[in-house]
Image (cartoon, rainbow, N blue to C red):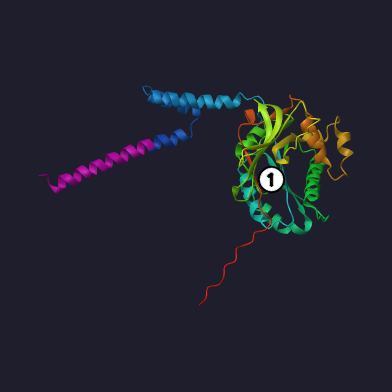
Amino acid sequence: MESPTSTSRKELHFCAKTLLHFSIFFTMGFIAAFMPWDATAYILDRHFSNSEQTGRILTSTNLSVGSDTEDQHYNSTRLVIVITTTQSDDKFHQGTLIRLAHSLANVPPPLLWLVVEAQNKSLRTTEILRGTRVMYRHLMYKENFTDPTAEKDHQRNIALRHIEQHQLSGMVLFSVPSIIYSLKLFKEIRKIKSFGAWPVASVGLNRRKVIVEGPICEDSKIVGWFSKDISSRATQWVSTMQDFESNPPKINIFGFGFDSSILWDPNRSSGTRSMTNTTEGFIKFVLEEATKEDGNNLKGIPSNCSKIMLWQLNIPKSFVYPSHPKPNL
């Protein structure tokens, strides 16, 4: 039977050996963190030269990096301009705006957020925007509206006019605070040359009705437009590019983006200036240009338009809480 002194020595030796191994591996990891990737990969390859699994990991990592750099149309430094319209009688406006701000804060820069709002409703929004980590511009107006559609058109015209006057070069897309984005959408948007479109899923109250609408694509080429009710599996309409003039598609305004240079392009500027004072204004011009553009500049994203990267939540303006009778005491 071993004495207590011998047992304590073995335990002490085991603890010292464990501490030594921990110190060695900690030091190696600390040094490797400050070394270039090529040097780190070389050391790992030398140390685990007999491990096929490590070789596969290193190879797959190099391939994934190479695939991103080979995309000639992707420009990670291209500015994305998000135009967000608001609604005066929306009681959930502040909460959805904060949620959208957190989403846009995760988008790799550069990104400019244009928030348009009535001046008499803008105080709380200003406080919210100042607390975000997003580069923004808060645009306000004094006009009063009773028609929500006319108010949204007016807000988008204000934002587009601001982009044109300051010649802010980048990809423009429209939004509202209740929209949910996939971050992949913003990477795909930076691949668009002139005009681009993508599928949009509109989700109704309690998710009982879901409508998906957007482009029909062959690879990245748009060959038509569709709208389908997923909840009932019914296709509402389909329009091809060939019968565009006889059967013009109703494009979801949140499902397309365009290069802002079209707003001051000398070949198109006469058309934009003639419509600046109309109700539709720039919106009508952009929609017409996006649908009439030839296939070389009109691109569907992602490839084959097979993924939904944007969800539009149709949130009610108000919510009526159910009334419960008071218990008899």
- Residue at the far left: name it: 1
Q: Residue 137 in the image: state x and y as whole percent.
A: 74, 48
Residue 77 visible in the current orientation:
no
Q: Residue 273 in the image: state x and y as whole percent.
A: 88, 38
On screen, residue 313 above or below 55? below
Say which amino acid is labelled 1: Met
Question: Which quadrant would residue 248 be assigned to in this image?
Answer: top right
Residue that appears at 87% across and 44% down:
278
Q: Residue 1 in the image: state x and y as whole percent.
A: 9, 44
Q: Within the magenta stretch, is there residue 24?
A: yes
**Does residue 6 appear to the left or right of 143 in the view shown?**
left
On screen, residue 210 above or below 247? below
- Residue denoted by label 1: 135
Which residues fall within the magenta stretch? 1-25
Disc 1: CA contacts within 10 A as few (<14), some (14-19) or many (>=20): some
What secondary structure is the stretch in magenta mostly built from? helix
**Does residue 291 appear to the left or right of 8 in the view shown?**
right
Front residue of 312 and 34: 312
Front residue of 252 and 170: 252
Q: Within the magenta stretch, is there residue 19?
A: yes
On screen, residue 74 above or below 323? above
**Does residue 328 appear to the left or right of 298 in the view shown?**
left
Residue that appears at 31% across and 38% down:
20
Front residue of 87 and 210: 210
Question: Which quadrant would residue 83 be assigned to in this image?
Answer: top right
- Disc 1 is placed on an element classified as loop
Q: Residue 181 in the image: state x and y as whole percent.
A: 63, 42
Residue that appears at 68% across and 30% down:
216
On screen, residue 187 above or below 93? above
